[in-house]
Image: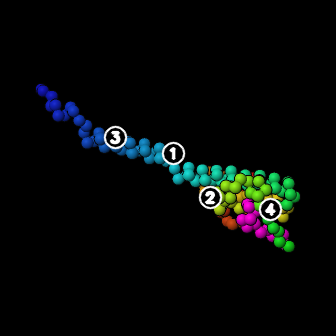
Amino acid sequence: MPKDKDKDNGFTLIELLVVIVILGILSVVVYSAINPVEQIRKSKDTGKKADSAELYSALSRYYTTFQKYPWTTGPNGEVAFGASYLTELEAKKEIIGEFSQRESLSSIFVSVNASKLIHICFEPESSSFKGLANKNIFGEVGTTHICVPE
């Protein structure tokens, strides 16, 4: 019996659908492993932690040199930070001028305890950094922060 030439030259619809389904499954697996949104959040948190460490280092150097922090303290010990402390750190060459323009500074805050020890903290966005968070600065339920020093 002679072979039909049309049947030997192509793929069936079922074969094409199987290949498309397999490629779809593989793309979902790769996308979940990469998770670009989580990677972006993680890179932002890494930047915040680096900026926190840099700010902590600058404040420590400033305190060592001038025996005070670059912000004002009220009569009851309350601290008035304002943005001027960054200007003071820049003026004393403890941080570079571009530091105060960084986007991450809007989510970084300085915490001073009764012993005048400082912590530079931020609330993490990524799930991997949330797992590392260890400080509950404001006593809020379910809110933890990453602080430098830890």
Cα separation between marks 3 and 4: 65 Å
Cα separation between marks 1 and 2: 28 Å
Disc 4 target residue: 70
Q: Is residue 118 magenta?
A: no
Q: Considering only vertical position in the picture, is 87 above or below 17?
A: below
Tell me if label 1 and label 2 are in contact, CB under 8 Å.
Answer: no
Assign the N terminus to one quadrant of the image. Answer: top left
Mark 3 or mark 4, whichever is nearer to me? 4
| Residue 125 placement: quadrant | bottom right
> Which of the pair 54/147 is nearer the observer?
54
Residue 136, position as x, y percentages in the image = 72, 61
Disc 1 target residue: 33
Q: Residue furthest top?
A: 1
Whether residue 131 is visible here, answered yes or no, is: no
Residue 42, position as x, y percentages in the image = 60, 51
Tell me if label 3 and label 1 are in contact, CB under 8 Å.
Answer: no
Residue 103 - label: 2
Secondary structure of the residue carrying tag 1 is helix
> Which of the pair 21/49 is nearer the observer?
49
Mark 4 or mark 1, whichever is nearer to me? 4
Q: Kindly identify the amino acid type of the residue bearing the numbered disc 3.
A: Val
Query: Is 26 positioned to the left or the right of 99 in the image?
Result: left
Query: Is 2 positioned to the left or the right of 97 in the image?
Result: left
Residue 19 - label: 3
Tell me the crowding category of disc 1: few under 14, some 14 to 19, or many 20 or more residues within 10 angstroms, Cα based. few
Q: Is residue 80 magenta?
A: yes
Q: Which range of residues does the magenta coloring cover?
A: 76-87
Query: Disc 3 or 2, which lies upstream in sequence?
Result: 3
Q: Kindly identify the amino acid type of the residue bearing the numbered disc 4.
A: Pro
